[in-house]
Amino acid sequence: MKIALKIMFVIFLVWMIFGIYLLNQDHEKAKIVMGLGVFYFSFLFMPFFIYYRYRDGKYQKYILNDEKLRQAFNQQGKKKS
């Protein structure tokens, strides 16, 4: 999965560089190429990246629950004293 993400990122970079080249050349399809690149990044690359990064429950430390909120408020009260 890590290699696939690297390949997808390289494809995105090449796609954007090609789109910038077309924009500089005033090509009529340059904006379409750039738009498709953003579409690729938003709906293909980012979901795969987020899944790869946060699988195996790595996201659990970022979820707020009652216990974490109580700990945060208790620590804040101790800092003011």
Image: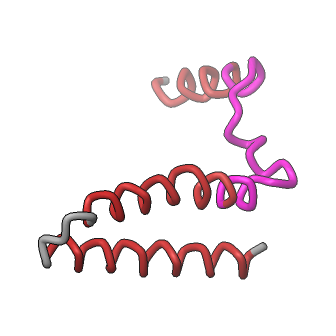
Q: Nearer the viewer, residue 55 or 71?
A: 55
Q: Residue at x 62, y 79 (%)?
A: 6
The percent coordinates of residue 16 (x first, y second) are: 36, 72
Magenta span covers which residues? 49-69
| Residue 73 horizontal side relative to residue 33, left or right | right
Q: Residue at x 23, y 79 (%)?
A: 21
| 61 over 34 or under it: above or below | above
The residue furthest right is 56
Q: Nearer the viewer, residue 78 or 57?
A: 57
Image quarter where the N terminus lies is: bottom right
The percent coordinates of residue 19 (x first, y second) are: 30, 72
Q: Main secondary structure of the magenta part?
A: helix
The percent coordinates of residue 71 (x first, y second) are: 69, 26
Residue 67: within the magenta?
yes
Residue 68: within the magenta?
yes
Q: Residue at x 77, y 22 (%)?
A: 67
